[in-house]
Image: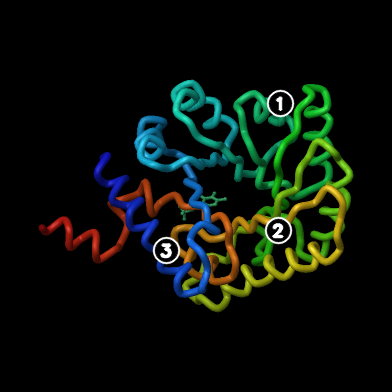
Amino acid sequence: MKDDILHNLEIINQRIKNACKKAGRNVDEVKLLLATKTISAERIKIALENGQTLIAENKVQELKEKYADLKDTRHENHFIGHLQTNKIKDILKYDVNCVQSIDRFDLAEKLHQRLLLEGKTMNVLIQVNTSNEESKFGIHPDFTIDLVKKVAELDTLKIKGLMTIGLFSAETEKVRACFKLLKNLQQEIILQNIPNVEMNELSMGMSGDLETAIEEGSTIVRVGTAVFGARIYPDSYYWDEEKN
Ligand SMILES: *Cc1c(COP(=O)(O)O)cnc(C)c1O
């Protein structure tokens, strides 16, 4: 189990490196975030004890279940799932450093109120629905700048950038269009010079499309199955090594 995870991390880091090289970017510009949904604390710990520092959950319930087991292993935890307003209190309890899935004002406002009460601040990303699929969460691209402006007025929330889940498709160019859209929105927002808004982070790219995302400017790739789902990872390098 340990060897699989470490081996997969090696492959992912190599993929990130290759993509950066191809895109003429410095590898330090791209952070690897491990999407740990359904993964046990024991397995997450293997990654954290071997150089990884950034993980993320989709559900408050899982955050809660793994909290005690992980809290003494140094790491940063982001939240990347759909957040219900009645779960905000819990997010603050379990040391989340950044909520990447702010996609509506109502959620931002309730989070702000809770943070005020507790005298805290929170890093956030605005999640954009770039694939135009009903099934995906995120604010519509046309309304993104307005949402950023409104959220920027809530001074406990520190906007650091944008997040998206690209289209699930084998057609690279369609996936690329999603990432380009996020990058363009970032550039437009930067031009508007909105107080209390930083736009350094673009969280985009997952196991299947991280190369495309890096080519389009991603600063955080969120990877789950390619690290923890070793047995289903169809990489020839992996199978070759099995034979050795
Ligand atoms: C699960 C998940 C990921 C990782 O997806 P993989 O395809 O397993 O790499 C990234 N982002 C979000 C929001 C996720 O829910």
Q: Position of residue 182 (x, y in %)?
A: 68, 65
Q: Which residue was labeled with disc 1?
A: 89
Q: What colour scheme governs how the chains and residues are painted in the rendered image of this protein?
A: rainbow
Q: Is residue 96 left or right of residue 12?
A: right
Amino acid found under the numbered disc labelled 3: Lys
From this view, report whether residue 94 is shown above or below residue 241. above
Q: Position of residue 45 (x, y in %)?
A: 39, 33
Closer to us: mark 3 or mark 2?
3
Q: Label 2: state its secondary structure.
A: strand
Choose top left, top right, bottom left or bottom right for residue 89: top right
- Seen at 82% across and 23% down, the residue is 117
**Label 2 vs 1, first from the N-terminus:** 1
Q: Which residue was labeled with disc 3?
A: 17
Out of 166 and 48, give the one closest to the viewer.
48
- Seen at 45% across and 71% down, the residue is 21
Q: Position of residue 57 (x, y in %)?
A: 54, 39
From this view, report whether residue 22 is shown above or below residue 210. below
Q: CA distance from mark 3 to mark 1?
A: 38 Å
Q: CA distance from mark 3 to mark 2?
A: 26 Å
Q: Label 1: state its secondary structure.
A: helix
